[in-house]
Image (spheres, helix red, strand yellow):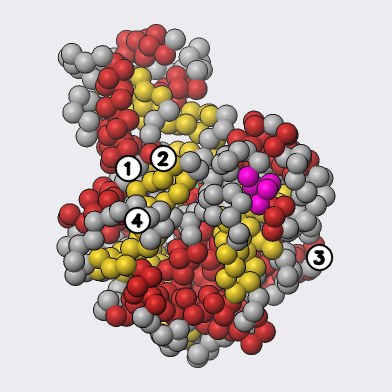
Amino acid sequence: MQINTFEEYQKAYDKSVKEPEAFWSDIAEKFSWQKKWDNVLEWNFKEPDVKWFINGKLNITENCIDRHLPEKAGTVAFYFEENEIGKPSREITYQQLHDEVCKLANVLKSFGVQKGDRVCIYLPMVPEAVFSLLACARIGAVHSVVFGGFSAQSLQDRINDSSCKVVLTSDGAFRGNKTIPMKPTVDEALKQCSSIEKVLVLNRTGEKVNMQQGRDFEWKEQVSKQSPQCTATTMDSEDPLFILYTSGSTGKPKGVVHSTGGYMVFTCYSFLNVFQYKPEQVYWCTADVGWVTGHSYITYGPLLAGATSVIFEGIPSYPDAGRFWNVVDKYKVNIFYTAPTAIRALEAAGLDYVKPYDLSSLKVLGSVGEPINEEAWQWYYKNIGKEKCPVVDTWWQTETGGILISPLASITKTKPGFATLPLPGVQPVLVDEKGNIIEGNGVEGNLCIQFPWPSILRTTYGDHERCRATYFATYPGLYFTGDGCRRDEDGYYRITGRVDDVINVSGHRIGTAEVESAINQCEDVVESAVVGFPHDIKGQGIYAYCIVPNSLKSHDEIKKEILNCVNKVIGPIARPDKIQIVSGLPKTRSGKIMRRILRKVAEGEINNLGDISTLLDPQVVEEIVKGKI
Ligand code: 7RM
């Protein structure tokens, strides 16, 4: 399954385009299937309808765990590094992983969870979070992880959208020197969630929490009663594996649905090839399981490959900015995968935090989540990799399930700021505004993919039309990513950022419409417009223009209210970095907000606002510019 040279990459790529079915079935053969597929692929991007490994039967956890047991029962699957520094690490072998997953799966069964039921997971970054995903998959329940930083309101929306039956949660989370309550947030959310029957509560922080009799159960008590054997439920290749909510340019977050067989094949294949993982190496991805990176490259990809990984509960800045390098040194990490926002923050902290640690175990450095600027790339390459480790800038999305464009470590020649070349099986195209495919090199356009890869999203939960309209309708016959992209003279791809109304804050996708709707729930605000602006550490920050008429309150008071409101409706990750109170917004005669102008003002480019002649009231712009200065 692993490519070893650039020539092999080119050969594999060629074959994947000319004979995609033969290419992917050769790879799929390497997994353990209860029954092989009848046909490899049926697809159209019109409805869309994509099916891989048709009628194949399998269980992904047998491939993640059971398949490795004859050789790896005693091999460490996960080292757990707690938030608090200096704690001994908890080691979880493949055998222990098997037992923990089976016990938890049996708890779910005892709660009445059946194949196809949805289970919400709202947990901190502890091993139990990974066990939870796998326990669901073991019995064919569909997991829906909600990042622990989301508010009660967001949690409630997500639980209701997919009518989850059970929540797996914790009393709270340790995060740096803070203890963050989680169970109270779940209690608040569940005030209006009629589908939830049972809640399993992990004791992590030890805070006292309310336990509702008949609904809430203590994690350890339940798990300890169960057998460490649980027959894996037989799943069809196309049965859903999970739902993960993600923001887009309009409306509420969508539940992206991934299916089982294709997702398994692609996450394993991409993990092995991008990172060039070799037996006995130690891999560490710093993401949270609440994001897709935590699904594909903490949980499924590494386990499918039989890897040994680190799970980290904490944050890069606690107890100080040397924590990542301390952990790399402690576990002799060989492959390290993080986000540009973390790299920039640690760069800003200075080299004194890097120097004390031995980083010589590192072989591969990865980046994900947002464009990596050249300066951060160079800093990472020089000071962390000591100019010996390739930096793999991996481009992908929640919807793509796995990495689509990236160097293969030590195989593809890298170039700072470039995700470089598509993985085998991935056929990117650039299109102009009208949808014409732009051929040749040295060109720029909107990034689309013209052929299905095994882990492409199958639908958006409960609303297939939304999936079609969002991803397959802008450019008929193509999957549209929402990203702008340049293909340089060498045919290398550079992702330039979103071309829609999505902001990428510290690698987290946030829809401007979502933030506006949260702000508009604030009593004193009548209307708002939100745009992104360049931010040194976060990549992009959130800039909110708010109309607040006739209020007796001070601007500072109102700004505080707005922040609280966003906190409550979405969560702290969506809090605006800057709020400007205005008396009007620049609108066209047809009433559309001219975001282009607001973006320019937020960026500070006030002398180059472009054409404002179509504005209903050009004076508004003058006032906004003045307010900014
Ligand atoms: C994995 C993940 C997806 C969006 C995507 C891009 C941006 C992600 C890169 C990147 C430039 C990269 N999933 N993005 N990786 N931009 N270079 N290597 O992040 O669904 O949360 O976000 O993130 O805009 O469309 S995501």
Amino acid found under the numbered disc labelled 3: Thr
Residue 486 in sight in this render = no
In the rendered structure, which disc, 3 or 1, sits on the residue that comes first in sequence? 3
Amino acid found under the numbered disc labelled 4: Asp
In the rendered structure, which disc, 1 or 4, sits on the residue that comes first in sequence? 4
- Circle 4 packing at 10 Å, graded few (<14), some (14-19), many (20+), is many
Against 442, residue 563 (above or below) is above
Residue 102 locus on image (x, y percent): 44, 80
- Asked whether 326 falls inside the magenta stretch, the response is yes
What residue would you read off at disc 3? 5
Q: Nearer the viewer, mark 2 or mark 3?
A: 2
Residue 327 locus on image (x, y percent): 66, 52
What residue would you read off at disc 4? 171
Residue 153 in sight in this render = yes
The residue stretch that appears in magenta: 323-327
Against 284, residue 65 (above or below) is below
> What is the CA distance from the residue labelled 3 to the residue labelled 4?
49 Å
Residue situated in front as seen by the camera: 473 or 398: 398
